[in-house]
């Protein structure tokens, strides 16, 4: 089964390194026969949250919000790639997530976290779990933490250690299971409104 999956990357820093992890996971998704779309906060260039996408009259939202909403609505699941800023998630990532609500619902998420140090961003991932659950896309139990991200992958996402293929494989096996389960359930209806939300 092939799925439409969205990779969300939330750093806008000049010398960001996490884009390497985002490109790696995008490649791994493609290798499994899925169709990934990478949404990069730097390219998306959203303003600080003033109005959510749903608060605009139909057809009046800014073009970058409209294009992102279209991708999200077509997605079967989301992989969030997050760095760790002072034990928390990057502000651009939180801003990107908060612009939407209904578009996330009833789809699973998974967290790839990274840092330039030895802990791989796991402290930020714990905060991110709370946000993803509140947005209606709870994360799977496994994480894919990447310590020293600047050394783990080349600029194009190629891993410097083949063990990353094995680690990502286990992580994505679990994610695929949740994607399949929730996709099947969305064809039946959701537990709040009881109508189809495929």
Image (tube, rainbow, N blue to C red):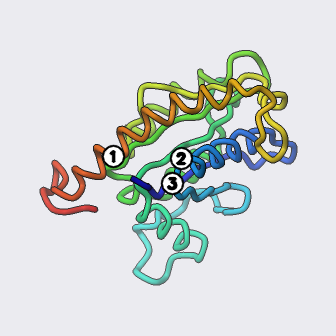
Q: Residue at x 12, y 56 (%)?
A: 194
Residue 27: numbered disc: none
x, y percent for residue 117: 78, 20
Report, in whole angstroms, how far the alpha carbon at label 3 lies from the one at label 2.
Answer: 6 Å
Q: Nearer the viewer, mark 2 or mark 1?
A: 2
| Label 2 secondary element | loop
Q: Is residue 172 left or right of residue 178?
A: right
Report, in whole angstroms, how far the alpha carbon at label 1 lies from the one at label 3.
Answer: 12 Å
Asked if disc 3 and disc 2 are in contact, CB closer than 8 Å, the reply is yes
Asked if disc 1 and disc 3 are in contact, CB closer than 8 Å, the reply is no
Quadrant containing the C terminus in the rendered view: bottom left
- Residue 74 quadrant: bottom left
Q: Which residue is mark 3?
A: 34
Q: Which residue is mark 2?
A: 32
Q: Residue at x 44, y 58 (%)?
A: 75
Task: Tell which of 169 and 77 is nearer to you.
Answer: 169
Q: Is residue 69 above or below residue 8?
A: below
Q: Residues within 10 Å of mark 1 (few under 14, many from 20)?
A: some
Q: Residue at x 50, y 58 (%)?
A: 99
Residue 180: numbered disc: 1
Q: Residue at x 57, y 45 (%)?
A: 94
Q: Is residue 198 left or right of residue 152?
A: left
Q: Sequence-wise, which precedes: disc 2 or disc 1?
A: 2
Q: Is residue 190 left or right of residue 181?
A: left
Report, in whole angstroms, how far the alpha carbon at label 2 lies from the one at label 1.
Answer: 14 Å
Q: Sequence-wise, which precedes: disc 1 or disc 3?
A: 3
x, y percent for residue 113: 62, 31
Q: Is residue 135 above or below residue 166?
A: below
Q: Which residue is at the far bottom?
A: 59
- Residue 120 quadrant: top right
């Amino acid at each position: 089964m092939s799925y439409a999956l969205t990779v969300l990357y939330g750093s806008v820093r000049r010398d960001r390194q996490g884009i390497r992890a985002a490109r790696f996971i995008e490649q791994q998704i493609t290798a499994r026969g899925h169709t990934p779309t990478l949404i990069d906060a730097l390219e998306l260039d959203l303003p600080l949250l003033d109005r959510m996408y749903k608060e605009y009259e139909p057809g009046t939202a800014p073009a970058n919000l409209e294009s992102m909403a279209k991708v999200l609505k077509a997605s079967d699941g989301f992989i969030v790639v997050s760095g760790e800023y002072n034990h928390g998630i990057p502000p651009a990532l939180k801003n990107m997530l908060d612009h939407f609500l209904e578009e996330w619902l009833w789809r699973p998420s998974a967290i790839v976290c990274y840092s330039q140090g030895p802990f791989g961003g796991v402290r930020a991932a714990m905060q991110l779990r709370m946000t993803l659950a509140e947005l209606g896309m709870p994360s799977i139990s496994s994480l894919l933490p990447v310590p020293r991200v600047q050394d783990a992958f080349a600029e194009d996402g190629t891993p410097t250690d083949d063990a990353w293929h094995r680690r990502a494989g286990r992580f994505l096996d679990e994610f695929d299971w949740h994607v399949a389960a929730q996709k099947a359930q969305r064809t039946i209806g959701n537990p709040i409104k009881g109508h189809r939300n495929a």
